[in-house]
Image (cartoon, rainbow, N blue to C red):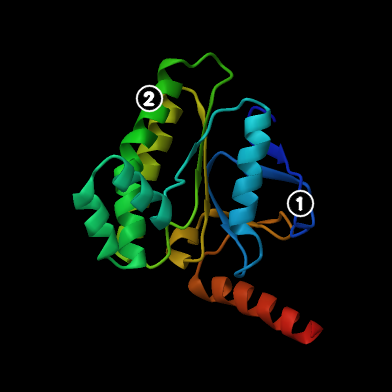
Amino acid sequence: MTSNKLEVKISDWYGLHKVKTFSFNQGVTCLIGKNGAGKSTLLHELKEALGEKNIFYYDNDDSERNALSKFSFYGDFDKMCRNMGSSEGQNIRNNFEDAVPRLGGYVRERLENKDGKQKVIILLDGLDSGISIDYIKTLKKDLFDLVLEDCNKNGLECYIILAANNFEFCENQDCVDVSTGKHIQFEDYYKFREFYLGRREKNENKK
């Protein structure tokens, strides 16, 4: 790990990735790749690698099943019924909004205990499954930008790494191809579309 980048060596138990060391720039990084390419798997491997180095991170491990179990355990039946009657996208939104205070607590702890070695690392999965474009815009502007601004003011490195299938998340962001580890940027939707369709056509030609 360097002062301006986060470099993480993964185990790649499933053989999905052509590289074993992934490098991330400060700011927002979108993990991209077709379904089954290993976006969620890479996030899991990043958590394991960071945990082995005792590096604290935040992750939104709030799937619909886990959320329902959590609400049931704590007797929060209003939220449990809300999730049972909502769409997948709405559940993801609800669960993440419920977890935002935990994210805020994690960031505040890093800001209050900075010692020159602290990094703010946020790992997010499944945020863009079925949620609206306007909500994605809101997340980027009202949450991601705010966290990055606070960290920058306090001299802390901040890395927000998320699995993304939606162009609205990836537009003009640093993106990492989970298969190759290469960094890509998409200025317009057509380049984003070409990336996914081109990858799909290559896979179909191999058959």
| Image height of 93 relative to 109, above or below | below
Label whose residue precedes the other's in the sequence (1 or 2): 1
Position in image of residue 172 (x %, y %):
50, 58
Which amino acid, by three-letter code, is at mark 1? Trp
Q: Residue at x 19, y 51 (%)?
A: 78
Which amino acid, by three-letter code, is at mark 2? Arg
> Which quadrant would the N terminus be assigned to in this image?
top right
Q: Residue at x 30, y 46 (%)?
A: 71
Label 2, on which residue? 108
Position in image of residue 75 (x %, y %):
24, 43
Q: How many marks?
A: 2
Q: Is residue 33 in view from this perspective?
A: yes
The image quarter in which residue 111 lies:
top left
Label 1, on which residue? 13
Position in image of residue 86 (x %, y %):
27, 65
Q: Is residue 142 in view from this perspective?
A: no
Q: Residue at x 48, y 23 (%)?
A: 155
The image quarter in which residue 151 lies:
top left
Position in image of residue 40 (x %, y %):
58, 55
Q: Secondary structure at mark 1?
A: loop
Q: Secondary structure at mark 2?
A: helix
For this view, does 2 lie left or right of residue 109?
Answer: right
For this view, does 47 lie left or right of residue 16?
Answer: left
| Image height of 162 relative to 37, above or below | above
> Which quadrant would the C terminus be assigned to in this image?
bottom right
